[in-house]
């Protein structure tokens, strides 16, 4: 049923939702969960199309195309999932849980990041067998927490607030090694759709807007802002910002936090455009559909306060109204 929070998908995962993503080709939605499953939904029709069970919690998933996808699991495996046959095969392994998976259309490669402090690139066209699919292993300064791609550029955020920026055409070393401008642990990194930089969020209610170009003119544009906070009895309560998703048409972006709110921001004009009504528990993940008409929201407790009674994990799909995501033109005062 559609409500202020959007339409709730039936047959949700039975444990924490680690990520969800819309396809680049349709309104299919791929969802990974701590219940050891990856689920494929048709978000428009509200139908569960497929389910893949793993031997451990699944920490991330992504599409290859509309017929297959990939998953990253706590059993150290990277898997390919074939939707038509509901079959899967193991592309390869890390030495610790695999936290992130991204498919690069530009490079035709799969990139995985693990708590074993490495990044691996895979060629999924290789025959089965790790030695034929593994392209390279690249050591990172710490455990990998978040990855994002735009074109040939890859941004890797790790523990210890490190950020490495790579060109996928030359992975021998990072193009840039940076430190997060935020003081606390990184939660999520997402590249701007226009390829000029990235947004990075932390556990301490902040988002940093960063630029790749190291010229002074570009670096003066960077800034950070506070969000997902509230004042209670004179003190600030600060929540982790778990998710960032850019709107594919307008380049505005949504953030989701442990306060249960989704906010939409216009980064260029440094303004909040919209706040959706509160979700039942923490917002764990967000994804816009390819045309920006739908926004998928994972309402799923992320255990930031340890084990405690919490709302059921749920996926809401909401129709996006242009007014919520379109930048407002700047209004200049009339000349005196």
Image (cartoon, helix red, strand yellow):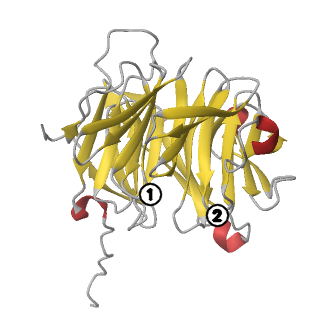
| 329 vs 4, nearest the viewer | 4
Is residue 178 placed above or below 118 in the rendered structure?
A: below
**Position of 290 compared to 102: left or right?**
left
Q: Which residue is mark 1?
A: 24
Depth order, front residue of 50/248: 50
Name the residue rendered at 62%, 64% in the picture.
Answer: 151
State the image quarter where residue 95 is shown: top right
- Which of the numbered marks, if any, corresponds to residue 106? 2
In which quadrant is the N terminus drawn?
Answer: top left
Q: Quadrant of residue 128?
A: top right
129, above or below 171, in the image: above
Residue at 55% across / 33% down in the picture? 88
- N-term mark: 2 or 1: 1
Identify the residue shown where x is 38% and y is 22%.
301
Quadrant showing the C terminus: bottom left
Question: In the rendered image of this protein, does residue 321 appear above or below residue 250?
Answer: above
Farthest residue to the front: give it. Answer: 85
Evaluate whether residue 209 shows in this view: no
Whether the residues at callouts 2 and 1 have beta carbons within 8 Å, the answer is no
Q: For the residue carrying disc 2, how many other residues have a C-alpha within 10 Å: few (<14), some (14-19), or many (20+)? A: few
| Residue located 38% across and 67% down the image | 250
Mark 1: few, some, or many residues within 10 Å (few <14, many ≥20)? some
Checking the image for residue 215, the label placed there is none
Tag count: 2
Query: Residue 133: horizontal and vertical position, in percent?
Result: 75, 44
Mark pair 2, 1: CA separation: 14 Å
Q: Under tag 2, what secondary structure? A: loop
| 177 with respect to 225 (left or right) | right
């Amino acid at each position: 049923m559609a409500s202020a929070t959007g339409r709730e998908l039936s047959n949700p995962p039975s444990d924490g939702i680690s990520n969800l993503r819309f396809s680049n080709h349709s309104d299919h939605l791929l969802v990974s969960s701590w219940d050891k499953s990856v689920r494929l939904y048709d978000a428009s029709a509200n139908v569960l199309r497929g389910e893949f069970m793993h031997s451990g919690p699944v920490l991330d998933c992504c599409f290859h195309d509309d017929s297959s996808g990939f998953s990253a699991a706590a059993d150290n495996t990277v898997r390919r999932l074939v939707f038509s046959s509901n079959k899967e095969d193991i592309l390869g392994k890390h030495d610790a849980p695999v936290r992130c998976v991204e498919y690069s259309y530009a490079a035709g490669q799969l990139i995985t990041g693990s708590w074993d402090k490495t990044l691996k690139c895979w060629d999924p066209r290789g025959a089965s067998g790790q030695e034929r699919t593994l392209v390279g292993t690249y050591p990172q300064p710490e455990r990998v927490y978040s990855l994002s791609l735009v074109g040939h550029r890859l941004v890797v955020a790790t523990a210890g607030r490190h950020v490495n920026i790579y060109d996928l055409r030359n992975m021998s070393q990072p193009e840039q090694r940076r430190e997060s401008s935020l003081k606390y642990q990184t939660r999520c990194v997402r590249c701007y759709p226009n390829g000029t930089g990235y947004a990075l969020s932390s556990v301490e209610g902040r988002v940093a807007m960063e630029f790749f170009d190291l010229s002074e003119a570009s670096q003066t544009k960077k800034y950070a802002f506070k969000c997902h906070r509230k004042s209670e009895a004179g003190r600030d309560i600060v929540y982790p910002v778990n998710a960032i998703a850019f709107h594919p048409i307008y380049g505005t972006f949504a953030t989701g936090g442990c306060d249960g709110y989704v906010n939409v921001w216009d980064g260029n004009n440094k303004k909040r455009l919209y706040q959706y009504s509160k979700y039942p528990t923490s917002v764990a993940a967000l994804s816009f559909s390819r045309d920006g008409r739908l926004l998928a929201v994972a309402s799923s407790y992320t255990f930031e306060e340890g084990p405690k009674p919490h709302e059921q994990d749920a996926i809401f799909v909401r129709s996006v109204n242009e007014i919520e995501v379109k930048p407002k033109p700047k209004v200049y005062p009339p000349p005196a």
